[in-house]
Structures are given as structure tokens and as C-alpha cells.
Amino acid sequence: MSELTRRQVLGLGGALGLTAAIGLSTAAALSRHPAATGAQLRSAVPLPPAFRTPLPLPPILKPVGTAGGVDRYEMTQREAVVEILPGVRTPMWTYEGVFPGPTIEARRGRPVTVTHRNELPVPTVVHLHGGHTTAASDGYPTDLVLPEGWQDEAHGTHHMHGMPEMGGMPGMRDPRAVVTRLTRDYTFPMSQRPTLLWYHDHRMDFTAPAIWRGLAGLHVIRDEMEEELGLPAGPRELPLVIMDRAFDGDGGLLYPSLDPALRTRPGVHEPYLAGVLGDVILVNGAPWPVHEVDAARYRLRVLNASNARHYELEAVTDDGRRLDLVQVGADQGLLAAPVLHRSLPIAPAERYDLIVDFSGVPVGDRVRLVNRLGSGRTRDVMAFRVARKAADPSRIPPVLSHDLPTWRRSDVVRARDFSFRAGRMHGDHGWLIGGQPFDPARTDVTTRLGDVEVWRLIADVHHPVHLHLVGFQVLSRGGSQPRPHDAGLKDTVSLRPGESVEIITRFNGYRGRYLFHCHNAEHEDMGMMANLEII
């Protein structure tokens, strides 16, 4: 991509350009609500009170085979009716009939193969977000798994990012697409640091509504070194998948798709071009849940699986005292040393590994996890109720990890600039990288295996930027030092409106075609992806 001129950089966040690109009402909404990028849906069904529903824990998927040093799993993508709101039945698209999908527990260095079977009415793709994965299993958006009988259906055309409609199966415009029918094996080497990953649908043009309908789940990597640290474990290690949704009057999910069948026309209605926000906060698929805890330390493995909503989390007691959030890990695993936060911003697709100590909270009292960026009911996330005193053998060691990479500017082979901004896309609204919408037939960046690069990412509005395959470190924000929450090895970084962020990474692991993109899922579907070729 071409270097940005100073004039282009300074003009990225301009209100005039943004208004011209995405429409007057959307631009006005962004200027009124600088803490959020998107518009909120309003549920039509009565919503339950907060902190009454018990926190569910996603089931652990059992392997169907372990021969040859490989753990093999099978997972069916299918429609199911799920109870999210108490007493209300909500049709969903699911992995294995549950929402979120079942968790895969993997061991570092032990490969995993997952056979996905598509029984949904549309094609799907599976991406293991944060996985160091060969290109063949990375879940490229046109590497589709087709449902039975798809080519025989009347709606056999697919409109990609404003491109002319084409006959045949989706992905036919991409000569490198690998399309399978009904099933596909995804193989994950697990040759990476222990961490919390997540898997989700990554189909071209329809990622956002597919995730909204339920296609997301957790994938945890563990190893002996991490387990020997003495961090809270067992029932005191809690996965927290935070997302927002909205519901229609019958209890179904609201989403402003231009094509509710998710077949031919991608995108959302104009008020939601900047992102879709729900008015119900879910954790592990439950609305504003509550969880009983001991008066002890807990490890919270937090994922923001929302399409567009940003959170700034605080743990607050009923008497207004804020508990420390001790960060021990980021997207790609443990930090070198703990980092203390009183509040913590988390953008879509980011993960944080946190320790919260409830030992100083009186038995019977409550600690609320709140979102400082929310208002009304979206300010609450969930609650913990301290149920009993208990022994606590856990600890937070001052040194967590010794294996973080040490890339230096002197190692850098090249530096690149990328703008993430609204723009016109084939005469329609879109979100662009370097002034261009995504095209699977175009290579945007070519780099050599093992090269170290510095990228400067520049935003107009909020953009959580995700790189496939590799982790990276944040070098600077706006020309200044990184913020405390930028510590460690990441694969997603949150750009704030008008902000530039420098990151450094080594492109190691595997050769092939990968992606980088905005993980505001609506932006992603409307063109904000680019191809990265590692040779």
C-alpha cells in the first residue's frame, strides 16, 4: 500500500470527509457519542432484571480421538432454539447446539484437528482467532463449507462488496478459494504460547450477522509452565465471553441486515453502518448474570465477542469501592510481569487475562462488573456475590513469563502506514484500508517469512485492528508511550478516533495468504480487510 502523505494523515478524522463517506446521520451520531462507534438497537421484548440469572459456563468439547499425538474433534454447525432471556425461546445458529459454542481445551505442542459439519442454510468459514495456523486452516473468507444442496438453490449469486453479481457459488471470483461441501477439517498446530483464543465464522461479507446469530466459541491453550505459576485454577478460573444483543417481540434476535437470509446482499441499513450495538449485555450467553464466588482470588479470562461495542470494565463493590484488576495476560498469552488497572478498556476481539481478589469483600456482599462506556442498562455487565470464606493457595508471581519476543527497531526490515477510514466503495458506503475495499483477488502486502516490520495504523473512528497468524507488540500511541493495557503480545489493537498506533511484529510461522482487518464486524463486512502474503 502506498505511503500516506501528511495531508492524508491529518485529514483522516475530519468530520467533512466522514460525513461525505458514511452519511450525515451516521457522522452526527459518531460525533455525539465519541466513546462508541455504532448505533444501538432497542429490544421489543420485556428484559429481565440484572443479576438474577446464574452465570453459565460453556461446555468443554470432548475429543473423538487422540491417536498419533493429535486430538481430533467433531463439531456440527446447526440451527437450535436457545433460552437466553429467562422463559424466552430464541432461534440461533450454533456450534453443537449451544451458545456460545463449546470450548476446546488444547495442550501446547499437541495438534488439534476439528472436523466442522455445516448443517446451516448458508455457507460458513471457521477462523481460529489468534491461532498460529497454516493458511489452509486459517479460515480465509472465501474458503467456504457449503451446505447440502447449495448449488441447486435459486439464489446462487453472491454480491461481494459492491462488485457486480456473479453466477455460481460464492467465492468463485477468487481463483484461490478452496470450497468444500458439508464438512471440512481444520488443523491447528498449537505451537504457540498458552492463551485464550476464540473461533468464529469468517464468511465473506456476512461475518457480522453470523457471529450475532451465535457462531462463536472459546479455544484455550495450556502448558505445564503456566500451570506451575500458581494462578487461580479450577472453579476459580472463569471464562467470560461478553457480547451485546437485541431481541424482537417474539424473542428472536434483532439485526438490521439488508438481506435477512444472509444469502445475496451483504450489509446493514444506513443507521447502523458504523456498527451494530445491542441493548442487552450477555456474559457466556446469559443477560447480566450473577456468579457466586469464594472470598478468594479468581482468574477471569475475558473476551469481548461483541460486533462493535467497546467496554471499559471496572469491578465495583456495593459501597462504591473499586477492586484492582491485575492483568496477567493479553491476546497472545502471559505478560512478563503483572500490570495493575483500576479500569480496563476492551475492544471487540480483544482478550484480557485478569486476577480479581474478593478476599476483602464481606460475605454476602456483591461486586458488579460495570462498563464505564455504557449508559442505562448497558452500563451493567454482571455481578459476583461473595458466598463464603475459603482457603486460597493461589498467588500472583512477580515474574510471569520469560518467552516474550524482543524485537528491536534495529531488526526492522521495513515500515508501512495504513489508514482505516470510511469511504465510497463502488458507489456505496464502505470502510477502507489505504483507500481500498477488500478484494480477495488482490495482494495488498507482501513480506518474507521471518521479516520484522513496523506498521503505523491510523484511524478516523474506533477501529480494533486484527492481524492473522502473528502476534505483535505496541510501540507507541499518538507518538507517545503505549498505554498500560497495551502490554504483552497482542493480535488485536484498539485504535481510538483520530489516533495512530505503531506496532512491531515478525512474520514467522507459515507462508501463504492471510488477512488483516478491522474487527468491528460491520466494518469488516463492508470492505475493511486486506490481504497479507507471506513468501
Image (spheres, helix red, strand yellow):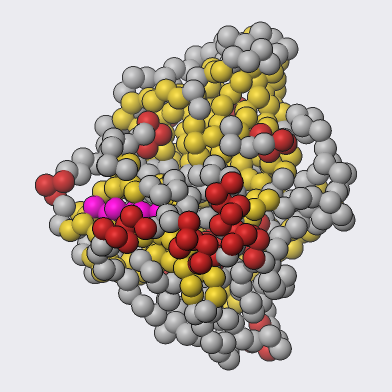
Q: Residue at x 42, y 76 (%)?
A: 440
Q: Would residue 457 appear left or right of 38 to someone viewing this image? A: left
First to last magenta residue range: 454-459
Which residue sits furthest left? Answer: 410
Query: Does the segment drawn in magenta span residue 99?
Result: no
Q: Nearer the viewer, residue 119 or 491?
A: 491
Residue depicted at 54% across the width and 70% down the height: 429
- For residue 348, above or below residue 177: above
Give the percent coordinates (x, y) of residue 21. 50, 67
333 versus 387 height, above or below: below
Q: Quadrant of the C terminus?
A: bottom left
Quadrant of the rendered image containing residue 159? bottom right
Can residue 67 be seen by looking at this rendering?
no
Compare residues 179 and 526 and report the one nearer the observer: 526
Give the percent coordinates (x, y) of residue 258.
68, 71
Quarter of the picture holding the N terminus: bottom left
In the image, 26 versus 71, the foreground residue is: 26
Kindly give the residue lying farthest to the front in the view shown. Answer: 16
The stretch drawn in magenta includes residue 456: yes
Which quadrant holds residue 145?
Answer: bottom right
Figure check: 533 above or below 467: below
Which residue: 53% across, 22% down?
A: 356
Question: What percent of the width, then of the height, locates residue 412?
Answer: 16, 52
Q: Which residue occupies 50% across, 40% down?
A: 346
Residue 106, percent across and down?
A: 47, 46
**Residue 281 sits in which quadrant?**
top right
Residue 117 in sight: yes
